[in-house]
C-alpha cells in the first residue's frame, strides 16, 4: 500500500501541532476525511441539494438520486440482500436505540434474557438496561478473559434457551479484540435468540459481509470510516424490520394519516422520519468508494502489521501496561495502555506536546474499566493512513512522559 501517496488525499494530516507534525492516533473516536469525500459533499451542495422523496422538481429528483444512490452503495459494501434493509440513522448509538425501542420493547418479555459483552460501548449497554428495566428482562454479560477474548465456553454458558437478544461489538473499542461474532451469531440462532452486531470499529477496517455473518441486525457510524458526522446505518433483515413498529413518527414515514390513526410507508422509509441527512449519506457513499479503491483486505492486512509493530515497541517499555490481546492477530488497530504512576489524561496531554493525538478516559466503557480493575486508560488507534514513522514518534514521546512529571530525574 502506498501510504505516502494516500496521505496526500488527507489535507488535515499535514497540519502542525505545537510545531510538530500531527500524529493522529484517535481513529477509534473519529477518522479524517479524504478530498474525494470533502469534494463530494461540496458537489452535492453546489449542484444537487433538495429535499428528497418530496419534490417533483429537478432538485427534488437529484437529491433523491444522491440519497438512494448512497443507500445502494452501503448495501453492496456490507453484502446486504436488499437496499430496503438499509436504514440511515445519525450514528451507531441511534441505530442501537432504534432496535431497542422498536424491537426490544415489543418483543422482549418478562424473564427473557439479553446477553451482551462486558466490553460493550455504553451505546450497546444503556438501551438494553432500559429494555430490561421496562420489560422485566434480565441483562447478562459475557466476560473477557486475561487475554481480552471471549471464549467459546464463556458465550455458550451465557447464551441459553432463555436468551432473546445477543448484542456484541465485532471489534472492541478499548481492547481491540476481534470477537468470533459469526460463531456467536450462529449459537444465538441455535438458542432462538436474535443477534445484533455493532460494527462501529470493524466496518471501517475489515471486509464485512452481513449475509455471511447471518446477523439479524448490524450497525455502524459513517464518521469512523472517512465520512461526515451525523450519518449512521442500521441494517436489519427484512423479516424483522417488517414486524417492528416505527421508532419515530412524522413526515416521510407514513402511507396515510387520519385524525386518529396512521399507516406507515414501506421499508426503509418507515424508519426514516423527517428530513434526512442527505449530504451525510453522500459523504458515506464517497467514503465507501474511497475505501473500495484501496481494498478492505489490504487495509486490514496493513493495519495488522502496523499494530504488531506498535505492540512490540510498546511492550519494550517496562512501565507501560497494555490491555487486551498482546499480538495483532485477531485484533484491530487499537492499543489501550497505562503508564505507571501517570494519569491517562496527563499521558494524552504530554503526548499532545509532541503532536501525538491519543484518547484518554473510560472510552464509554465503564463496566469494562471496572472488569479490568482500572479507572481509565490511554488509547492509540490507527487507520490505513498511519505510518511506521508515526509509531516511532509516538513511542519516543511515550518514553518522555514520566520524565515530564519528574520521574527518573532524582
Ligand atoms: N460502538 C462502538 C464499538 C464504538 O466504538 C462507538 C464509538 O466509539 C460506538 C458504538 C458509538 O458510536 P457513535 O458515537 O458514532 O454513535
Image (spheres, rainbow, N blue to C red):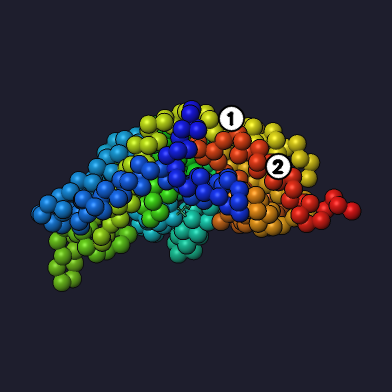
Label 1: how many residues lie within 10 Å, few (<14), some (14-19) or many (20+)?
some
Instruction: Residue 95 in the image: state x and y as whole percent.
Output: 39, 53
Q: Is residue 28 visible?
A: no
**Count of all numbered marks drawn on residues in the image:** 2
Tell me what residue is drawn at x 30 percent, y 45 percent: 40
Q: How far apart are marks 2 and 1 (CA)?
A: 19 Å
Nearer the observer, 212 or 21? 21
Residue position marked by numbered label 1 in the rendering: 305
Tell me what residue is drawn at x 50 percent, y 59 percent: 126
**Helix, strand or loop for disc 2:** helix
Label 2: how many residues lie within 10 Å, few (<14), some (14-19) or many (20+)?
some
Residue position marked by numbered label 2 in the rendering: 396
Q: Is residue 403 positioned above or below 208 on the image?
A: below
Nearer the observer, 367 or 352? 352
Please indicate whether residue 167 sits to the left or right of residue 73 in the image.
right
**Helix, strand or loop for disc 1:** helix
Amino acid at each position: 500500500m502506498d501510504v505516502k501517496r494516500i496521505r496526500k488525499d488527507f489535507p488535515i494530516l499535514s497540519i502542525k501541532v505545537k510545531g510538530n507534525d500531527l500524529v493522529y492516533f484517535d481513529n477509534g473516536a473519529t477518522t479524517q476525511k479524504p478530498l474525494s469525500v470533502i469534494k463530494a459533499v461540496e458537489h452535492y451542495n453546489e449542484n444537487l441539494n433538495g429535499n428528497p422523496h418530496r419534490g417533483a422538481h429537478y432538485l427534488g429528483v437529484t437529491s433523491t438520486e444522491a440519497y438512494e444512490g448512497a443507500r445502494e452503495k452501503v448495501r453492496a459494501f456490507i453484502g446486504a440482500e436488499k437496499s430496503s434493509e438499509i436504514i440511515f440513522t445519525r450514528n451507531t448509538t441511534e441505530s442501537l436505540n432504534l432496535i431497542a425501542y422498536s424491537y426490544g420493547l415489543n418483543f422482549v418479555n418478562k424473564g427473557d434474557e439479553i446477553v451482551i459483552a462486558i466490553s460493550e460501548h455504553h451505546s450497546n449497554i444503556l438501551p438494553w438496561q432500559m429494555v430490561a428495566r421496562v420489560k422485566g428482562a434480565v441483562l447478562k454479560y459475557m466476560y473477557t478473559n486475561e487475554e481480552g477474548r471471549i471464549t467459546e465456553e464463556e458465550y455458550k454458558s451465557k447464551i441459553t434457551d432463555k436468551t432473546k437478544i445477543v448484542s456484541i461489538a465485532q471489534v472492541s473499542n478499548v481492547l481491540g479484540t476481534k470477537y468470533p461474532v459469526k460463531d456467536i451469531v450462529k449459537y444465538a440462532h441455535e438458542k432462538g435468540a436474535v443477534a445484533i452486531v455493532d460494527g462501529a470499529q470493524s466496518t471501517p477496517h475489515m471486509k464485512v459481509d452481513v449475509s455471511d455473518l447471518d446477523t439479524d441486525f448490524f450497525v455502524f457510524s459513517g464518521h469512523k470510516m472517512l465520512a461526515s458526522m451525523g450519518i449512521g446505518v442500521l441494517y436489519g433483515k427484512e423479516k424483522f424490520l417488517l414486524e417492528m413498529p416505527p421508532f419515530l413518527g412524522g413526515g416521510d414515514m407514513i402511507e396515510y394519516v387520519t385524525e386518529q390513526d396512521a399507516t406507515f410507508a414501506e421499508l426503509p422509509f418507515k424508519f426514516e422520519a423527517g428530513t434526512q441527512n442527505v449530504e451525510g449519506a453522500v459523504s458515506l457513499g464517497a467514503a465507501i468508494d474511497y475505501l473500495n479503491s484501496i481494498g478492505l483486505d489490504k487495509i486490514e492486512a496493513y493495519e495488522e502489521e502496523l499494530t504488531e509493530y506498535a505492540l512490540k515497541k510498546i511492550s519494550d517499555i517496562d512501565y507501560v501496561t497494555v490491555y487486551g490481546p498482546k499480538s495483532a492477530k485477531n485484533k484491530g488497530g487499537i492499543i489501550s495502555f497505562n503508564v505507571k504512576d501517570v494519569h491517562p489524561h496527563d499521558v494524552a496531554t504530554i503526548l499532545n506536546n509532541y503532536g501525538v493525538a491519543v484518547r484518554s478516559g473510560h472510552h464509554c466503557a465503564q463496566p469494562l474499566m471496572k472488569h479490568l480493575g482500572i479507572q481509565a486508560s490511554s488509547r492509540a488507534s490507527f487507520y490505513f493512513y498511519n505510518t511506521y514513522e508515526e509509531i516511532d514518534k509516538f513511542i519516543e514521546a511515550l518514553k518522555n512522559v514520566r520524565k515530564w512529571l519528574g520521574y527518573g530525574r532524582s
